[in-house]
Amino acid sequence: MITKKRLKSGNVLFALALISALYLFSISSSVWAQYSYTPLLPPGWQRAFAWPINNNSVVVGFGDVATTAKGFIYDGANYTELLPAGWQEASATAINDNGVIVGSSNDETAGKGFIATPTSQQQIVTIINFFDISVSNGTLIGVGPTATSEEGKLAALENMLKQAESLIQSGSIAEACQQLADAYKKTDGNPNPPDFVTGSATAQLASQIQDLRTNLGCP
Ligand SMILES: [Ca+2]
């Protein structure tokens, strides 16, 4: 009888252990299943390490290219190499939501840290890339009564941003500020005037436009 009881309790314990194992396995399977992977390797590079990602989904990292090491920035569509002028090698190790990067590097004399602040030209490129990525992944949607009208609003807003880009490139800062002010009003969540876009990326886009306006010294 004792043996039978022991066997029974042993069976119960075994069953509990099996159920726990199956449960844990199902948790770990479902956790892994929630991710899709994007390999990161700038074109022509032999090796890359990805470091942090900011809230605009911009990743920085570093790796080996030819006989040197460089940092890289990946904005979801394009890679930009990072190597301070005159320095032999660099690595990028952090980026904030304004796109300011810190890293370390070597010039002829010493290993040094660096801060890389994006120029206004780089900022508007980043904003347009963010716009394109957000439209393609469905987090930025045109506002309108029909699909054609929605597409028209997206195209109009993109056109404003591209106008601002060419104005910044040509040094017409006052006009660029005006374009960006108009673009901001179409993304700011205030119904007056009505926004051209909606979706979870809208606030981030508005914030990026305001950051650029601040850096340009817009009134
Ligand atoms: Ca508005």
Image (tube, rainbow, N blue to C red):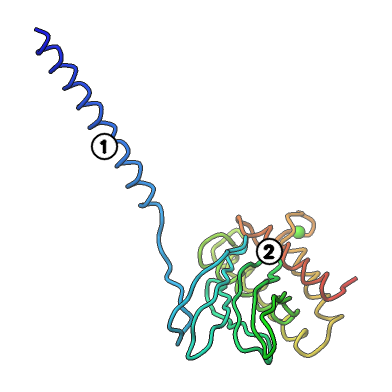
Residue occupying the far front of the picture: 109
Say which residue label 2 marks.
97
Label 1 sits on what residue type?
Leu
Which quadrant of the rendered structure holds the N terminus?
top left
Q: Look at 83% across and 69% down and name the residue there.
A: 214
Residue 85: quarter of image:
bottom right
Residue 90 screen position, x and y as percent:
61, 81
Say which residue label 1 marks.
22
Q: Look at 22% across and 32% down and name the residue there.
A: 18
Q: Nearer the viewer, residue 111 or 117?
A: 111
Q: Between tags 1 and 2, which lies in front?
A: 1
Residue 202 screen position, x and y as percent:
66, 59
Q: Nearer the viewer, residue 123 or 93?
A: 93
Label 2 sits on what residue type?
Asp
| Secondary structure of residue under mark 1 | helix
Residue 28: quarter of image:
top left
